[in-house]
Image (tube, helix red, strand yellow):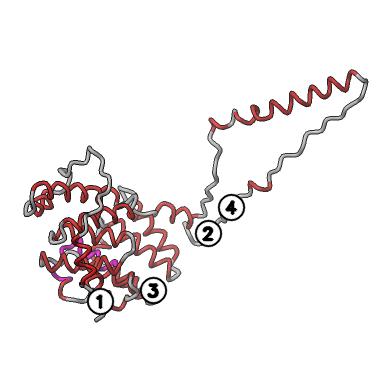
Amino acid sequence: MQGRGRFENRGRDDRREEREPVKRLPIPDEVTGQEIDPSVRQELMSLPKGLADDVARNLVMVAQLLDEDPERAYAYSRVALRLASRVAAVREAAGFASYATERYAEAIAEFRATRRMTGTVDLWPVMADCERGLGRPERALEMAGAPEVQKLDRAGQVEMRLVAAGARQDMGQAEAAVVTLQSSELASSAVHPWTARLRYAYADALLAVGREGEARDWFAKALEADQNGTTDASDRLAQLDGVEFVDVVPEDETPEEPESEAEPEAETKAEVETKAEVETEVDITDEAEPSTFLDDPFKEPQKSDDES
């Protein structure tokens, strides 16, 4: 049967793996495990104290590394999973680590396990996005219309809308993606944690259908709401406005130039003095500076006449 992920072949090899010692990864001494969310700590109380602390420290490493080094976060999540696979928080952490490293089959298997353990639908949007990652956007759209979506809170419903719009784009339905994102949350002037991403996605969808002027306005709105820098709305605005970025040599590096030329100058002077003694006239000509390699590698985007 398809779709069973890593649970497809639970046999002798898996049982042998479970009996093998867990290969630990180094964890800094300052990581105590107390940093985790209290609700996760509550779940870990079902384990012996020493084991609970060990799992908690690995989960802290997953959380700390997930954005900056997802592969390392994934490695720590596998350790936690070997230690406490029957704890829902561990399965969820393993799912997000797999998701961050684009191991979508593993991710959706872990999210499904978490849902079975907890009975909640909070992970429904990210499960649908895993379907997109597996090349099944039509399945993601089916999930967007499922009854589970009505049980999501407002933030979850916005996430589901973002996933559905992405699925539309995956299927080449750019206009439908624009319509999918149009909602009361998009029209609202209030700023929520998901506002910047929703406005950004809408701007990107508008740009995909050639509505450049409107796209610029929505990128600007996304930038206004993006207090934590979660999007690159400022860069997209700069591209649409035709702003050109050029690398500038820091001022503290400029003194190095005459220093590198000092030795050749002294050598040239010595040669002149030596040849002057034998009354030989010398003509010194400086070499031309090569500059062609400094051509700007950034091509300036074309700006529309009607764009303000």
Instruction: Measuring from the top left, give residue 76's x and y in whole percent.
Output: 26, 53
Q: Amino acid at mark 1?
A: Gly
Amino acid under label 3?
Ala
- At 75% from the left and 39% from the top, the residue drawn is 288
Kindly identify which residue carries mark 4: 297
Q: Amino acid at mark 4?
A: Pro
Residue holding disc 1: 3
Q: In the rendered structure, which disc, 4 or 3, sits on the residue that comes first in sequence?
A: 3
Res 77 seen here: yes
Upstream in sequence: badge 2 or badge 1: 1
Q: Which residues are magenta?
A: 149-163
Camera-side residue of 131 and 250: 131
Separation of disc 4 and disc 1 at Cα? 46 Å
Residue at which label 3 appears: 174
Nearer to us: label 4 or label 3: 4
The CA distance from mark 4 to mark 2 is: 18 Å
* Distance from the alpha carbon under mark 2 to that under mark 1: 47 Å
